[in-house]
Image: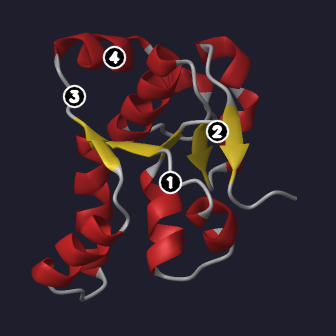
Amino acid sequence: MTEYVLDASAIIAIIKNEPGAALATGRLLNGTIVSVNVAEVCQHLLEFGYEPATVIALIDEMHLHISVSGRELALLAATIDRRLLRRRLSLADRFCLAEARRRGVPAMTTDRDWLDIAADIGAEIELARPA
């Protein structure tokens, strides 16, 4: 079974039952999320009025492996050039992509722009919201 590194957008889609939630949910079994992406999920949900305890419970229910971003991953994320995207690529996005590249597994996101840079950064991308 294929492993996946899930971007914050995929987790948010699941929690908020947005388009792409079903496909992203199917990737949870062997899913990993980087700790900075967990922070991004938490920040987003707190801004939308979720209670902190609820946010943690929702993330825990997914049983994702949480990868701690050590110095090796931090350096790899820093090497991903933000100019590869037409819009700003967040630091959390770069950590997700770096973890996927390091593990040699696909990154799951709802961000279609990532398809344009996949080859340049050496990471496979799977969209939770295919066309």
Please tell me which of labels 3 and 1 falls first in the chain.
Answer: 1
Residue 26 vs 99, above or below: the answer is: below
Label 1 close to label 2 by CB (< 8 Å): yes
Q: Is residue 74 visible?
A: yes
Residue 3 vs 72, above or below: the answer is: below
Q: How far apart are marks 4 and 1 (CA)?
A: 28 Å
Please tell me whether mark 2 sits on a helix, a strand or a loop. loop
Q: For label 3, count other residues whose C-alpha is less than 10 Å away and answer few (under 14), some (14-19) or many (20+).
A: some
**Front residue of this view, candidates 45 and 128:** 128
Q: Mark 1 points at which residue?
A: 29
* Residue most extreme to the left: 53
Viewer-side label of 3, 1: 1
Q: How far apart are marks 3 and 2 (CA)?
A: 24 Å
For the residue marked with disc 1, what is the amino acid?
A: Leu
Please tell me whether mark 3 sits on a helix, a strand or a loop. loop
Q: For label 4, count other residues whose C-alpha is less than 10 Å away and answer few (under 14), some (14-19) or many (20+).
A: some
Please tell me which of labels 1 and 2 falls first in the chain.
Answer: 2
Q: Name the residue under label 3.
A: 69
**Front residue of this view, candidates 48 and 29:** 29
Q: Name the residue under label 4.
A: 78
* Rendered-image quadrant of the C terminus: bottom right
